[in-house]
Image (cartoon, helix red, strand yellow):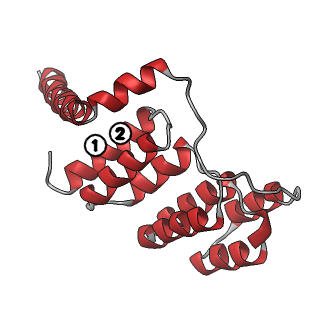
Amino acid sequence: RQASRATAKMKKKIAASLALLAALLRRWPLALAFSASSPPSSGGGRRRRSTGHSEELVGELKRTKHPKEVFRLLDDYDEDIDVYAVTTAMGKLRRFGRSREALRVFERSKQLGVALNVFAYSAAISACGRDWERALALFDELRRRGMEPNIVTYSALISACEKGGQW
């Protein structure tokens, strides 16, 4: 009996999520039609020169124990920042409860010309928290840059809308 109530509750949540996703998809019908006819893209932006230190930076970012270390590493490895370093830094900052700083890293990486991909945008959308309007703006930007959203992107967007009371 308890299991059937839990199943019913889960079905309601899934139905609500699907309804929200359908509403979101209705908002971008032309973009969806365009993306169906074009190959997926890893995103815009110029490619940055890699000096081979990106893997070292990502490894150090994964081992950080404090948010200040994240920023120090990003400063130290400024020329070696790539999309993997950006997403790792953003994830680490979010785990430290610093979502605003994670979004600043994302914005700064765009200024530096890092070629961001759907994973970086998904991390940024996830960092929006209750700011569902910003999450939608990032989603629109992702689509304009020719990237194909994935399940993580949609999940982050739905979560932002739910947290922002737009459920």
What residue do we see at 23% from left, 49% from top?
Answer: 161
Q: Position of residue 4 (x, y in %)?
A: 14, 20
| Amino acid, disc 2 | Ser
Q: Judge from the rendering whether residue 88 lies leftward or rightward of residue 127; answer left or right.
A: right
Name the secondary structure under disc 2.
Answer: helix
What residue do we see at 53% from left, 63% from top?
Answer: 106
What residue do we see at 42% from left, 71% from top?
Answer: 100
Eyeballing the image, is 163 above or below 11?
Answer: below
Could you tell me which quadrant the C terminus lies in?
top left
Q: Label 1 near label 2: C-beta < 8 Å? A: yes
Q: Position of residue 145 (x, y in %)?
A: 49, 44
Q: Where is residue 69 in the image (x, y as percent from the top left)?
A: 66, 77
Q: Residue furthest right?
A: 51
Q: From where the camera sits, is residue 96 visible? A: no
Q: Nearer the viewer, residue 32 or 79?
A: 32
Task: Give residue 155's mark.
Answer: 2
Q: Nearer the viewer, residue 111 or 70?
A: 111
| Amino acid, disc 1 | Ile
Say which quarter of the image contains residue 131.
bottom left
